[in-house]
Image (tube, rainbow, N blue to C red):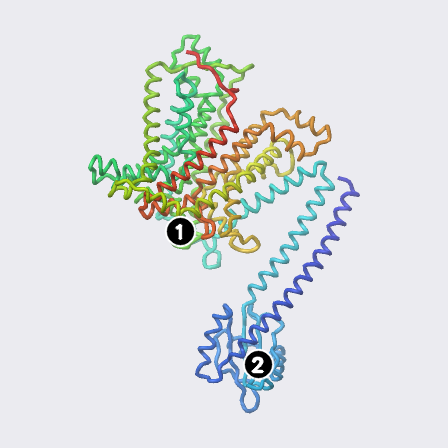
Amino acid sequence: MTKRKLIKVLVAALIFAVLDVWMSSSLLGAFRSYYEENSLKEVSLFARSAPEDPLYYQDWIASLSQVIEGGKVMILQIDPDWNFIPTAADPEAEAIWNTHHESDAFIQGLESVYYVLPYQVPHLIDGMRVYLLPIPDASGFDITGAVLMAVPAGSAGQFEELLISLGILAWIIFTTLFAVGLLSRDPITGYAVIFLFAMAVVFVAYPLFEAFRLTFVEAGVFSLNIWKRTFSPQYLIPLWGSVKLGIITASVSTVIGFAFAFLTERTGVGGKKLIGTLATMPVISPPFSLTLSIILLFGNNGLITRQLLGIDQFSVYGLGGLVLVQTIGMFPIAYMTLSSVLKSIDSTVEDAALDLQASRLRTFLTITLPLSLPGLLSAWLLVFTNSLADFANPLLLAGSYRVLSVEAYIEVTGRSNLGGGAALSLLLLMPTLTAFFAQRYWVNKKSVVTVTGKPSTRLAELATKPVRICLSIFVGICLLFIVSLYGTIVAGCFVKNWGIDYSFTLSNIGEALSRGKQAIGNTVVLAVVATPIAGIIAMAAALILVRRTFVGKRVLEVLLMTPFAIPGTLLGISYILAFNKPPLLIVGTAAIIVINYLIRELPVGLETGAASLRQIDPAIEEADQDLGADMSKVFTSVVLPLIRPSFLSAMSYTFVRSMTAVSAVIFLISARWYHLTVQIYNFSENLRFGLASVLSTVLIIIVLGAFGVMNFLVRDRGLTEKSIIR
């Protein structure tokens, strides 16, 4: 930065400010002139419709609200001395007359009325534009009375504020971009950082601030009543319900996930690819699918409970059913996390322990398990967070068991209380953040690093034959149960009325596809639009955060990772509050759903890209820059090809999550842009299980197809494979 360049920036900013003010003033003047002219014509036409008979005055006054929302009116008659006498009026219009009728503006206005000329008071009165209008006689050259009309100035004032705000924003954008282009050594990086900051502030920080602000506002004034109700026993009970459910689900899921990961990564059992494929099925299927299967099998009219076992009193609804369905749906998260941990352990220390005559059990308890603890805690935290934010399963299966995510949904949709829903969603952050910081504190306090030279390419077999058999039986039972659940969904497509009439039918398919055609098309289109944008932004953000140093880097990283920690209900409510008013009035459009996909799934793609970049030597990029390539060229020609697997994984993950999203999307859908998961929920809630099964099957097929394409494009080259030595 030099003095000369700084002067150039200041001069350019000053010139643009002058042009900006001139343009904004011209636009404001033209708008005000047009608005006032049209408003005057509108109210004048209404004044001409005033009845001659005083008996109809009140009906005519009441009709103003149908023509001009919030308008107030008074009729003035002329006495023999040509004085204006108030005859009939709204209380607000009468108050304006009583207060201001002797003012210079009103005296001038009444003089204009004498000459059959409409008049607008030049200043606002109590936020209203006030007009004095003649009631002409049949000839049009004389008057029979006058009308005082007050019209709210809200819409015009809001447009003027918006125009001024856009002018200021244009000046800020120009000055910032010009300064970065002139002062920065790498303008492309500077522009990218500004874009990411703007995206994070507008679509992360601003909506959350709006949600937080609304929790302190009641009836338009500052109040703590919302938080008082939020911390009352009425909602502390569902908070504990969510925490209790999360603790049980996370603990059981982590144990099951560890068993799956240990069997596939640390034993020589066969069929590992099949186990991995079936184990990850719940992650890539719709959130309602497993719940739907549980209801069909174990519900009040379930195939197993009622038809096969004849049990009448059993109920799957409540905590037990929720733990079952959440565990099945979320243990794959723990499995995938722990698979990487167990695979990456260097077995040199384990080999040394076995060489020193330590038993396999002792080696596992003293070496393998401690080395896996950070991964175990991370897996537990991920499942716990997902369980708290889970919105789909409790909607159908909670019964009388209360959880906070559903309570927040009821506050918004059932009671139209956005502030209460936002407060409950924010309350969900407390246990999530507590678990997160506790996990980080423990991991940072402990040291579980194994320092080795060349990593070992083999792993010691720690499981004895009986242990392998037990693990195989346990995993086989779990997979058989998962397959049976998905088989139930497919079977439900061809059952006439599950629980009552199990006769074969194909009518469900035609009706479901006919009624769900729009939802299927909308869901696929929105996911396809969001997928490439999310992948490119995630990889570019990863490159900037990993390879560049700039002011505010830590703040930007926190903002971009925040959506991963917040519940989907909170994000949906925040977007309604933030984007249901100018300047970004996008609620009800496809844009807000696509933006929700981008922001919600960006952290996963960002972390995936960052992990890949840390494995690439920066010297490759530096060599390209030394040859004259700028940041954009380095990104497209060097970085993107090297992190292609991460790029495709991020896009595929975004597509899958977009197809199966529900927690935030259910607040953002509209009649024009509907979502398939919401359609499935509506069918399930109305006990149309056959139709819900058809749409669930369609969604599973689409998602599996996308996942298959991803696995084809991003093949495992076997670079991280290790042999198991018994």
Look at the picture and state if 55 lies above or below 295: below
> Mark 1 is on which residue type?
Glu
Identify the image quadrant of the C terminus.
Answer: top left
Q: Residue 252 in the image: state x and y as whole percent.
A: 36, 30
Reading the image, the residue beneath label 2 is 134
The correct choice, above or below, for 225 with respect to 681 in the image is below
Q: Badge 2, how many Cα within 10 Å: few under 14, some, many 20+?
A: many
Q: Residue at x 33, y 28 (%)?
A: 480
Q: Earlier in the sequence, mark 2 or mark 1?
A: 2
Q: Is residue 472 above or below residue 543?
A: above
Residue type highlighted by circle 2 = Pro
Q: Residue at x 75, y 48 (%)?
A: 10
Res 606 quadrant in image: top right
Q: Which mark is residue 411?
A: 1
Residue 138 picture location, percent across and down:
55, 86
| Residue 350 appears anywhere in the view | yes
Q: Which-is-in-front pick, marks 2 and 1?
A: 2
Q: Is residue 422 visible?
A: no
How far from the left and from the top, in percent, is residue 69? 50, 68
How many labels were placed on the picture?
Answer: 2
